[in-house]
């Protein structure tokens, strides 16, 4: 089983839609979580951290569900510019390990 | 401007040739990383270094070599032993020696002639 799994998509949504994707992790000792955004043929860029209490930044909301071992990213009022691949990262500090998910592709259509 | 600089942006390798990809950071970060990304795929860790003069193999180190003689520099050599080197190579750095948020350079696209 992979340490981190993401639905590769693509998720095809119209502008203005709300879309959510999850990232499941296998190790319950995972301690920190992040979402990155990667545009086509570009480098990944940090989008937001995921806190235990949840985290909101404008149209983006990230949440952590430790009981079910997944994090989520919700995008409200989707824009064309949100089209990208979204990668999750899980860190296990005690084991000096980190894992990137393979990414979920989002296409926002006009 | 603080950041991570990778060069060149595009690189072509001939059969049997070793090539070196440059990665420099002026963020004063302790740790640096090299990844390979194939089209439509996720990131795969090649090597990482948490401190000068020390580095560890990642998941796909075969056919690659690195050095970390200076804190700000972590060059990657793709050797002739790497039979399928065509990929997008990304360098990243993070502040501390432990696992931390990583910041990426713009990448180098390597192709075989």
Image (cartoon, rainbow, N blue to C red):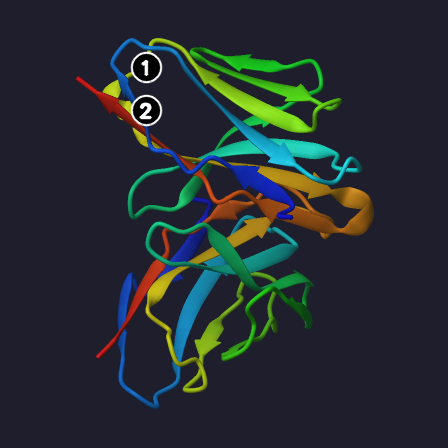
- Residue A78, disc: 1
Residue B62 vs B26, above or below: the answer is: below
**Figure check: B85 above or below B80:** above
Residue A38 placed where, x, y %? 38, 39
Is residue A33 toward the left or the right of residue B25 in the image? right
Give residue B6's quadrant in the image: bottom left
Task: Determine whether label 1 and label 2 are within 8 Å by CB.
Answer: yes
Q: Label 1's element?
A: loop
Q: Residue at x 58, y 75 (%)?
A: B67
Residue B78 position within the rendered picture, expressed as x and y whole percent measured from the top left:
43, 77
Task: Bin the neighbour count of mark 1 within 10 Å (Cα to Cα): few under 14, some 14-19, many 20 and up.
Answer: many
- Based on the displayed image, in which of its 4 quarters is residue B86 positioned? bottom left
Q: Where in the figure is residue A62, as x and y percent of width and height?
A: 56, 19
Q: Residue at x 53, y 65 (%)?
A: B73
Judge by depth and name the residue closer to the eye, A77 or B2.
Answer: A77
- Kindly identify which numbered label has been placed on residue A82: 2
């Amino acid at each position: 089983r992979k340490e981190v799994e993401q639905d590769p998509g693509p998720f095809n949504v119209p502008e203005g839609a709300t879309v959510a994707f999850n990232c499941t992790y296998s190790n319950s000792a995972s301690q920190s979580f992040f979402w990155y955004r990667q545009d086509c043929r570009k480098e990944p860029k940090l989008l937001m951290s995921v806190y235990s209490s949840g985290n909101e930044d404008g149209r983006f909301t990230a949440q952590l569900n430790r009981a079910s071992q997944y994090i989520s990213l919700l995008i409200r009022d989707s824009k064309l510019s949100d089209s990208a691949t979204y990668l999750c990262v899980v860190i296990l500090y005690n084991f000096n390990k980190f894992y990137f998910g393979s990414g979920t592709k989002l296409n926002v259509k006009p | 401007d603080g950041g991570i600089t990778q060069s060149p942006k595009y690189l072509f390798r001939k059969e049997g040739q070793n090539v070196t990809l440059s990665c420099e950071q002026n963020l004063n970060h302790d740790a640096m990383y090299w990844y390979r990304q194939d089209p439509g795929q996720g990131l795969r860790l090649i090597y990482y270094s948490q401190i000068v003069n020390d580095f560890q193999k990642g998941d796909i180190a075969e056919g690659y070599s690195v050095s970390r003689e200076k804190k700000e520099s972590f060059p990657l050599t793709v050797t002739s032993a790497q039979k399928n080197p065509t990929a997008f190579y990304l360098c990243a750095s993070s502040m501390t020696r432990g696992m931390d948020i990583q910041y990426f350079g713009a990448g180098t696209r390597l192709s075989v002639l």
